[in-house]
Image: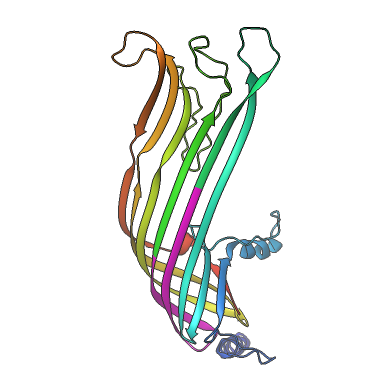
């Protein structure tokens, strides 16, 4: 009988708590027209507090992106129950690596020349959608649709201090490992035939799609929610052909004598289309409204 009364009291208290749209200080829990919101992944915070009850290491939580696209997610409320939502990523990375090789000379010398590896990677992503919300308690459901666009490039260029000449057909040059963004292959700048790669341009990538989504949030503090989201979307992605430029002192195709040869090799691209459900990275998110 005692357990029954305790359960009833706990149920009544929980119901009252969730039904309360205002804090004791008079602060509204729910977003209203004019509010903005920004989201992060809640998993690092949940793991952090959960580790208090275990012997696991407990590093401070970090603010991770709430999506797979490394995009900043925001919302803008036009009405209490209606919001525009969007996300954006603009990634530009330019790296440069320098090493030195002995300078080629017909006379003894102790000087060196510079070899240089330059890498440029861009990643852009944008999404835009509308969100309808339902519920006046501290638990709100939401649903809506959104579309997205993505574009990316990746290029690797190499400059060598010692040129290939009739006097120096196999110059001393630095051997760089190509640092791809996602390609798991281990490739360096010396080809199987002894040539030197001067450019490796990955094919440009392009993606477009749309999705419908459904989820729920619980406002544990005023204007601070934890929630989840599922979606059903379709998308198309295209990757163009990659191009590899190399140079070498060799006999060209159809030739009869060795000479300086530049070769251009294409690697195939791909395209993909799919329709599938998703769960927004498979983790719980947090949104902050202001």
The reply, left or right, for residue 146 in relation to residue 228 is: left
Our reading of the magenta stretch's main secondary structure is: strand
**Quarter of the image containing the N terminus?**
bottom right
Q: Is residue 73 above or below residue 33?
A: above
Depth order, front residue of 152/46: 152
The reply, left or right, for residue 122 in relation to residue 13 is: left
Residue, x 48% and y 61% (percent of image)?
Answer: 282
Image coords of residue 86 (percent x, y): 47, 69
Q: How many marks?
A: 0
Q: In this view, does 14 lie above or below 55?
A: below
Image coords of residue 270 (percent x, y): 32, 44
Residue, x 45% and y 46% (percent of image)?
Answer: 153
Image coords of residue 115 (percent x, y): 60, 27
Depth order, front residue of 259/224: 259
**In the image, is residue 127 part of the stretch drawn in magenta?**
yes
Residue, x 67% and y 65% (percent of image)?
Answer: 49
Picture quadrant of residue 132: bottom left
Q: Is residue 205 above or below residue 192?
A: below
Depth order, front residue of 156/231: 156
The magenta-colored residue range is 122-147
**In the image, is residue 141 part of the stretch drawn in magenta?**
yes
């Amino acid at each position: 009988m005692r357990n029954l009364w305790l359960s009833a009291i706990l149920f009544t208290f929980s119901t009252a708590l969730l039904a309360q749209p205002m804090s004791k200080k008079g602060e509204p829990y729910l977003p209203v027209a004019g509010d903005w919101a920004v989201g992060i992944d809640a998993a690092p915070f949940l793991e952090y507090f959960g580790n208090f009850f275990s012997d696991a290491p407990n590093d401070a939580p970090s603010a991770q992106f709430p999506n797979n696209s490394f995009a900043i997610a925001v919302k803008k409320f036009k009405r209490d129950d209606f919001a525009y939502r969007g996300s954006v990523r603009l990634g530009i990375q330019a790296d440069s690596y320098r090493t030195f090789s002995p300078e080629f000379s017909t006379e003894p010398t102790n000087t060196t020349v510079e070899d240089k590896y330059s890498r440029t990677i861009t990643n852009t992503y944008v999404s835009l959608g509308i969100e309808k919300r339902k519920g006046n308690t501290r638990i709100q459901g939401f649903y809506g649709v959104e579309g997205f666009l993505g574009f990316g490039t990746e290029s690797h260029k190499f400059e060598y201090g010692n040129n290939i000449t009739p006097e120096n057909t196999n110059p001393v040059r630095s051997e760089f490992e190509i640092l791809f963004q996602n390609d798991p292959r281990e490739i360096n700048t010396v080809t199987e035939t002894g040539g030197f790669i001067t450019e490796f341009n990955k094919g440009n990538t392009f993606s477009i799609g749309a999705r419908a989504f459904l989820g729920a949030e619980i406002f544990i503090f005023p204007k601070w929610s934890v929630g989840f989201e599922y979606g059903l979307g379709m998308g198309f992605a295209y990757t163009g052909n990659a191009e590899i430029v190399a140079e070498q002192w060799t006999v060209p195709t159809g030739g009869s004598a060795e000479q300086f040869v530049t070769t251009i090799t294409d690697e195939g691209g791909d395209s993909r289309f799919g329709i599938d459900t998703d769960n927004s990275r498979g983790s719980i998110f947090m949104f902050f409204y202001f």
